[in-house]
Image (cartoon, rainbow, N blue to C red):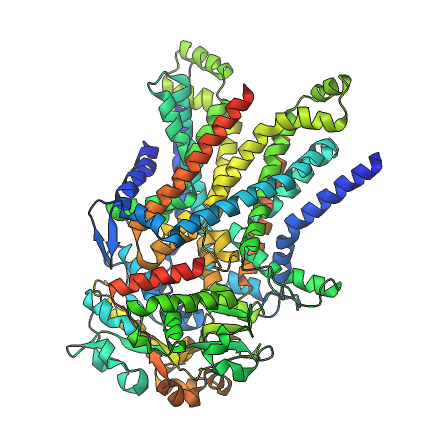
């Protein structure tokens, strides 16, 4: 009886994993497709489509754009999120409840609606669309996240150490830079990492507030709309493999650090 | 305990460096080429075979934004700043409206090969106003019926009514562009596209709903032609050479036909925005696209094929390509097809509502 | 400040826009509730909301039903040192681009696609079948994404449960099933609710999955909103639709929050 239950459980888990991996396996497999139509029968393997996309300047450029936007907007989000969390946690500010609510409110609003709001606002104010506006959009969605993560990690324990530093003559900036930031390092890092992830894969905001300097998801979208070819599969697989390597490296480094 | 001030400023400095480096990483787009040309296009213009030679010759970077449907293009223009756009690829029949709203610049007639354009698609009534030329025809084709001849009877495809019968229920894809599709429905109803009024819309809606019951999907250029290519659908209404010719070498079983009730003629033209800051370069771009080589590349673009407007492109195309485009049969096709009917703003909005209802049905 | 500038301001502008209207290609800056009236008067606009709600509820329920057992198995049956790997494996597919993943599902589900071919091979069907371009394809695409999300939230919740709760229940004479129903399930409700709410918000506001997989057989709310913007720059109508969607989400949020609180009392 016990064995049977375990067997059923593992079968279930494996089936669900199969479901989860199915599209990814298909994606990677058909990125090596020889012909133009990415459906069975599989004829290949061929590196033709990888070559096609790596020699396509626009895709590579979009890749760079994505990296830049993700890193910069996440940096800004973390800094703003930290400052907001710091002032709310350490100082008695009036209406702090309302401010906190406002800061986290974007979490519950669909990206599409945020995108549209930003588009209308930029239009009304006459701000031209660019990578910069995409960055603004990504900070809007990532700031609440960073704030929430950092705020939740600011405990009384750190407050005491900070008070001690202040008693020893450190000014506000010194306390923040030399005490709080180093102590909150893991939270800051987690927030940054999550932000990068979200920004990296975000489509609808980038799509609506950009013109020609597009990020990778937008470029992929226009590839999907401008012709049938497995180049899309090749780009998708490439990004996937790079990210996986990146995660494992990161995981490895972080894991090491915590252990030490 | 003393705190070292330097350390803080050091931290600030490295943050600043990080910012600079990161922003440099985002910059390659700007240092790539000195000049830029921004064009608002249908997706067939995004093929490197068409764009690369021009970029290399003039050392410019051509930025392309693709759209589908003139309404969408005007929406993009409206959401931009004046001067954002240089070249506009716009449907031939929509030129007067765009000229009317004062968006286009006059083109130099003496520099462009107007006389080489097929007579039937010159459309001077559309591209000229008060003796001034505002656009030149570049490409055309048909919104008719594409099909897979291994799966359906080609003889059936000559009659639009079969698509409304039960014979091919669940085998039909619909091209998602309300103007040509509602025009085709009018033809099926025995109404000339130009005679569409608000009065026929209720009847047309019923016809659309019936079509919906027979259809398996509704999609834009790529989605609908993909559906046909992968076997998701066997018939594409609103399709034409544009949906199947691109695969003519690999999937010769995909074919297209003008039904007996007639077909819709689509046409694209090239124009320059009045607010463009690169007028001269924009004209050069138009010359490039209108040249026989440019025309051939455009006609066989990876997004969709179509007849080149310039007759001189004939020699630049291969026999196979000309056959897929039905070069020799053009005269007959042109005689039996209608231009898109362009409704006024009010009727347009009513037609869009009907179309949205059709999608939702 | 940032939030005010780029979050609150857009909403104010959107609110104003939603009261204007667009005729032809001109913006009429006259206040009226015409757009909201239209929403209820034109059935195809209203239906997009009901379609969205149906799809979202379906996705949320299926995802929870699929994810809970997996989270439970991972937390209880899998040895600790394998859990890490199992979790990493579970989120691995999410490092492909969201767009590409939807597109990939299209290839998997379409007629002539992988599933259809597989079923033909093993003789389960004799005709090629298609599962793409309809509502179930949209639902499958969504469920794929949210099963993992929910597995993570529920897993985290299960891990936080002190082991001795279950022992206590057993000592008091409860069998494994009763322990589960009366002890474990109620204690993991917060995890389920958080995950379910996230699923709801993300799902109802997503444009990509229905756009790629739905085949435009029907329109969901985000598609209708995008249509207004893309086809004719009709920001007033789009704004009113967006605000309606937001109101619905907020109502669900309040309901969730309230329900959770009541539950705790």
Instruction: Classify A199 as above or below C168.
Output: below
Q: Residue furthest left?
A: B130
Q: Is residue B279 visible?
A: yes
* Quadrant of the image occupied by residue C68: top right
Q: Outermost residue, top direction?
A: A167
Percent x, y for residue B77? 28, 59
Q: Nearer the viewer, residue B350 or A177?
A: B350
User: Vertically, is C143 above or below B297?
Assistant: above
With B161 as the anchor, is B193 left or right in this view? left
Which residue does the image show at 29% across and 75% down from the upper left? Answer: B195
What x and y, as percent, mark residue A82? 42, 27
Q: Is B235 rendered above or below residue C165?
A: below
Residue C63 falls in image quadrant: top right
Quarter of the figure that contains the C terminus of chain B: bottom left
Quadrant of image for the N terminus of chain B: top left
Residue B4 visible, this orientation: no
> For this view, does C77 lie left or right of residue C187?
right
> Residue B75 at x, y = what percent?
30, 58
* Residue nearer the viewer, A226 or B193: B193
Left or right for B110, reference B69: left
Give the residue drawn at x 64%, y 64%.
C129
Q: How many marks?
A: 0
């Amino acid at each position: 009886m016990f064995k049977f239950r375990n067997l059923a459980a593992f079968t279930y888990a494996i089936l669900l994993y199969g479901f989860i991996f199915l599209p990814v396996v298909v994606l990677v497999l058909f990125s090596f497709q020889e012909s133009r139509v990415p459906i069975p029968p599989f004829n290949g393997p061929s590196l033709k489509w990888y070559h096609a996309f790596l020699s396509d300047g626009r895709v590579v450029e979009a890749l760079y754009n994505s990296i830049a936007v993700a890193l910069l907007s996440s940096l800004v989000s973390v800094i703003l999120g930290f400052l907001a969390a710091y002032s709310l946690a350490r100082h008695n500010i009036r209406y702090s409840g309302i401010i906190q609510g406002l800061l986290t409110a974007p979490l519950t609003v669909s990206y599409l609606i945020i995108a549209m709001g930003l588009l209308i606002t930029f239009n009304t104010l006459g701000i031209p669309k660019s990578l910069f506006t995409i960055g603004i959009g990504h900070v809007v969605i990532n700031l609440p996240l960073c704030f929430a993560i950092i705020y939740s990690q600011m405990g009384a324990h750190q407050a005491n150490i900070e008070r001690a530093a202040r008693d020893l003559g450190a000014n506000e900036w010194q306390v923040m830079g030399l005490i709080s930031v180093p102590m909150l390092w893991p939270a800051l890092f987690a927030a940054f990492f999550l932000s990068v992830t979200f920004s990296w894969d975000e489509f609808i905001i980038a799509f609506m507030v950009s013109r020609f300097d597009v990020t990778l998801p937008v470029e992929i979208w226009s590839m999907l709309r401008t012709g049938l070819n497995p180049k899309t599969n090749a780009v998708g697989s490439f990004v996937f493999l790079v990210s996986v390597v990146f995660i494992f490296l990161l995981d490895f480094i972080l894991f090491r650090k915590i252990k030490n | 305990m003393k705190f070292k001030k330097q350390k803080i400023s050091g931290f600030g400095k490295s943050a600043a460096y990080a910012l600079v480096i990161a922003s440099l990483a985002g910059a390659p787009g700007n240092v790539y080429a000195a000049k830029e040309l921004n064009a608002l296009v249908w997706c067939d213009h995004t093929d490197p075979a068409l764009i690369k030679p021009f970029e290399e010759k003039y050392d410019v970077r051509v930025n392309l934004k693709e759209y589908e449907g003139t309404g969408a293009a005007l929406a993009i223009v409206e959401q931009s700043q004046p001067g954002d756009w240089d070249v506009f690829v716009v449907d031939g029949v929509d030129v007067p409206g765009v000229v009317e709203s004062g968006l286009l610049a006059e083109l130099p007639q003496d520099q462009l090969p107007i006389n080489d354009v097929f007579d039937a698609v010159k459309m001077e009534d559309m591209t000229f106003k008060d003796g001034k030329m505002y656009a030149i025809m570049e490409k055309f084709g048909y919104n008719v019926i594409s099909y897979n001849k291994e799966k359906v009877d080609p003889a059936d495809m000559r009659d639009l009514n079969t698509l409304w019968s039960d014979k091919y229920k669940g085998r039909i894809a619909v091209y998602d562009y309300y103007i040509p599709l509602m025009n085709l429905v009018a033809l099926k109803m025995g109404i000339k596209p130009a005679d569409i009024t608000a009065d026929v819309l209720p009847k047309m809606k019923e016809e659309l709903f019936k079509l919906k019951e027979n259809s398996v999907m509704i999609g834009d250029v790529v989605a609908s032609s993909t559906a046909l290519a992968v076997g998701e659908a066997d018939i594409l209404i609103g399709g034409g050479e544009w949906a199947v010719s691109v695969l003519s070498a690999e999937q010769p079983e995909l074919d297209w036909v003008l039904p007996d009730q007639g077909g819709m003629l689509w046409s694209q033209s090239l124009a320059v925005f009045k607010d463009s800051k690169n007028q001269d370069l924009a004209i050069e771009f138009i010359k490039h696209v209108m040249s026989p080589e440019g025309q051939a590349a455009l006609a066989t673009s990876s997004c969709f094929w179509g007849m080149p407007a310039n007759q001189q492109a004939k020699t630049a195309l291969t026999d196979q390509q000309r056959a897929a485009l039905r070069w020799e049969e053009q005269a007959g096709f042109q005689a039996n097809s209608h231009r898109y009917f362009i409704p006024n703003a009010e009727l347009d909005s009513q037609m869009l509502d009907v179309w949205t209802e059709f999608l939702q049905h | 400040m940032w939030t005010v500038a780029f979050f609150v301001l857009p909403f104010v502008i959107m609110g104003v826009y939603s009261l204007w209207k667009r005729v032809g290609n001109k913006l009429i800056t006259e206040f009226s509730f015409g757009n909201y009236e239209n929403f209820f008067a034109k059935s195809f606009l209203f239906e997009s909301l009901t379609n969205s709600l149906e799809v979202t509820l379906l996705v949320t329920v299926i995802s929870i039903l699929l994810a809970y057992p997996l989270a439970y198995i991972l937390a209880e049956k899998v040895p600790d040192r394998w859990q890490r790997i199992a979790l990493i494996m579970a989120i691995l597919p999410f490092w492909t681009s969201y767009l590409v993943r939807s597109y990939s599902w299209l290839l998997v589900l379409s007629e002539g696609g992988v599933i259809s071919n597989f079923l033909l091979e093993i003789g389960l069907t004799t005709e090629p079948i298609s599962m793409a371009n309809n509502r179930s394809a949209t639902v499958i695409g969504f469920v794929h994404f949210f099963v993992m999300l929910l597995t993570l939230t529920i897993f985290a919740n299960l891990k936080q449960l002190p082991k001795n709760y279950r022992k206590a229940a057993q000592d008091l004479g409860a069998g494994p099933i009763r322990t589960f129903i009366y002890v474990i399930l109620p204690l993991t409700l917060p995890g389920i609710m958080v995950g379910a709410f996230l699923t709801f918000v993300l799902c109802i506001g997503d444009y990509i999955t229905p756009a790629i997989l739905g085949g435009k057989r029907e329109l969901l709310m985000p598609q209708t909103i995008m249509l207004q913007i893309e086809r004719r720059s009709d920001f007033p109508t789009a704004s009113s639709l967006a605000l309606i969607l937001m109101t619905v989400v907020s109502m669900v949020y309040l309901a969730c929050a309230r329900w959770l609180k009541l539950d705790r009392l």
